[in-house]
Image (cartoon, helix red, strand yellow):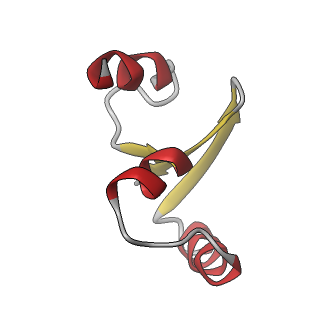
């Protein structure tokens, strides 16, 4: 079931790249997705270490 969910979240833009969605962060880590965490993601996007893809009702964070 979990593997099928991961396959459904993958798109042609994320094919072959490592990515996470916010639901994965909630489910698999102890971290909270709050303003501080969003700020960290924005810094990583600014440094071009992370790319944010939106679509299909999900926000995907692709590691570069």
Q: Residue at x 56, y 53 (%)?
A: 51
Q: Position of residue 5 (x, y in %)?
A: 40, 22
Direction from residue 42 to residue 22 in the image, left or right = left
Dividing the image into 4 quarters, which one contains the N terminus?
A: top left
Q: Is residue 25 left or right of residue 44?
A: left
In the image, residue 26 sits, relative to residue 60, either above or below, namely below
Q: How many marks?
A: 0
The residue closer to the viewer here, 54 or 34, is: 34
Q: Residue at x 27, y 22 (%)?
A: 3
Q: Point out the image quarter for the C terminus.
A: bottom left
Choose top left, top right, bottom left or bottom right for residue 45: bottom right
Report x, y in % for residue 63.
40, 53
Q: Nearer the viewer, residue 9 or 64?
A: 9
Residue lying at the far bottom of the rendered structure: 36
Asked if residue 40 is positioned above or below residue 5 in the image, the reply reads below
Residue 13, percent from left and from top: 52, 27
The answer to whether 9 is drawn above or below residue 30 in the figure is above
Q: Residue at x 45, y 30 (%)?
A: 14
Whether 41 is drawn above or below 40: the answer is above
- Residue 11: x %, y % from top left: 51, 20
Q: Which residue is rendered at x = 69% and y = 23% of the image?
A: 56
For residue 27, side relative to residue 36 (left or right): left
Quarter location, residue 35: bottom right
State left or right for residue 9 relative to residue 58.
left
């Amino acid at each position: 079931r979990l593997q099928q969910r991961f396959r459904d979240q993958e798109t042609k833009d994320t094919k072959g790249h490592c990515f996470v969605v916010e639901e994965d962060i909630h489910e698999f880590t102890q971290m909270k997705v709050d303003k501080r965490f969003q700020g960290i993601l924005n810094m990583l996007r600014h440094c071009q270490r992370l790319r944010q893809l939106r679509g299909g009702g999900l926000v995907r964070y692709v590691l570069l």
